[in-house]
Amino acid sequence: MPKIVVVYLSTSGNTKKMADAIVEGAQSRNVEAVAMNFHEAKIEELKSADAIALGSSTFHYKMLPPMEKFIESLSKLNAKGKIGGAFGSYGWSGEAPVMIAEKMRELGMKVIDPVLRVQYTPEEKDLEECKRLGKDLANKVKKT
Ligand SMILES: Cc1cc2nc3c(=O)[nH]c(=O)nc-3n(C[C@H](O)[C@H](O)[C@H](O)COP(=O)(O)O)c2cc1C
C-alpha cells in the first residue's frame, strides 16, 4: 500500500490539527498515512514514504528553525521524485509553508501547488481543506 508521512512542528497545536486532518483525508482514500512530530520522525521511515508532507507555523517571517534543520537532514535520503506537500498555521504573514515547498523542490520533490496555509486555529472549513490535501496526496501516490 502506498504510504504518506506527515511531519509537523507546532508550538500551540494549530499546525498539528492541520497534520491530523491531512492524515484523515489520506486514509479516507485507503492509503497508509501517519502524522508525527518532527522530533519523532526517523529518516528511515521517510525513506519508505511515497509522499511526504511537511508543516511548520510561521515565526518571525520564517519556518521554525528546527524544521529548517529537519529539511536539511532530508538531503541524506534520496527524496528525488517523491510527492510533497507543505502546510502550516500562521498569524499575519505566513512565509513558512512557501519556504518549505521551495526547499522540497530543491531536493527534487514534486510539491503540490498551492501550499496550504491556515490563519491561527483551523476551523471546520479549514480542516476540510486539509483533508482535501490529504486526498490529493493519496490520489497522486496511487498513480505513481
Ligand atoms: C513570537 C511569535 C512570532 C510570530 N511570528 C509570526 C510571523 O512572523 N508571521 C506570521 O504569519 N505569524 C507569526 N506568528 C503567529 C503564529 O504563526 C500563529 O500563532 C500560529 O497559529 C501558531 O501555530 P502553531 O500552534 O502550529 O505553532 C508568531 C507568533 C509568535 C508567538
Image (cartoon, rainbow, N blue to C red):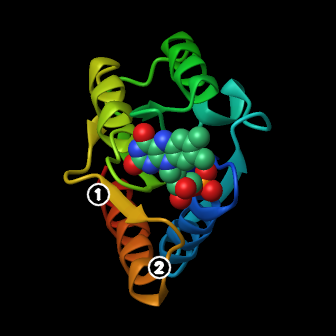
User: As drawn, is 45 to the left or to the right of 124?
Assistant: right
User: As drawn, is 63 to the left or to the right of 45?
Assistant: left
**Labelled disc at residue 143:** 1
Q: Residue at x 20, y 51 (%)?
A: 113
Residue 5: x %, y % from top left: 58, 49
Q: Residue at x 74, y 30 (%)?
A: 42
- Residue farthest along the right direction in this orientation: 40
State which quarter of the image contains the N terminus.
bottom right
Is the residue indicated by label 2 positioned so its CB lies within 8 Å of ligand 1?
no
Q: Earlier in the sequence, mark 2 or mark 1?
A: 2
One can see residue 55 in this view: no
The quadrant holding residue 80 is: top left
Q: Residue at x 28, y 18 (%)?
A: 106
Residue 48: x %, y % from top left: 59, 36
Question: Of discs 2 and 1, which sits in the foreground?
Answer: 2
Q: How many marks?
A: 2
Position of 3 relative to 105 (above/below): below
**Labelled disc at residue 12:** none
User: As drawn, is 40 to the left or to the right of 12?
Assistant: right
Assess disc 1: are there few (<14), some (14-19) or many (≥20) residues with their C-alpha within 10 Å of its C-alpha. Answer: few
The residue where tag 2 is placed is: 127
Q: Amino acid at mark 1?
A: Lys
Q: Amino acid at mark 2?
A: Leu
Q: Give the SS element for disc 2.
A: helix
Q: Nearer the viewer, residue 139 or 9?
A: 9
Assess disc 2: are there few (<14), some (14-19) or many (≥20) residues with their C-alpha within 10 Å of its C-alpha. Answer: many
Residue 59: x %, y % from top left: 51, 38
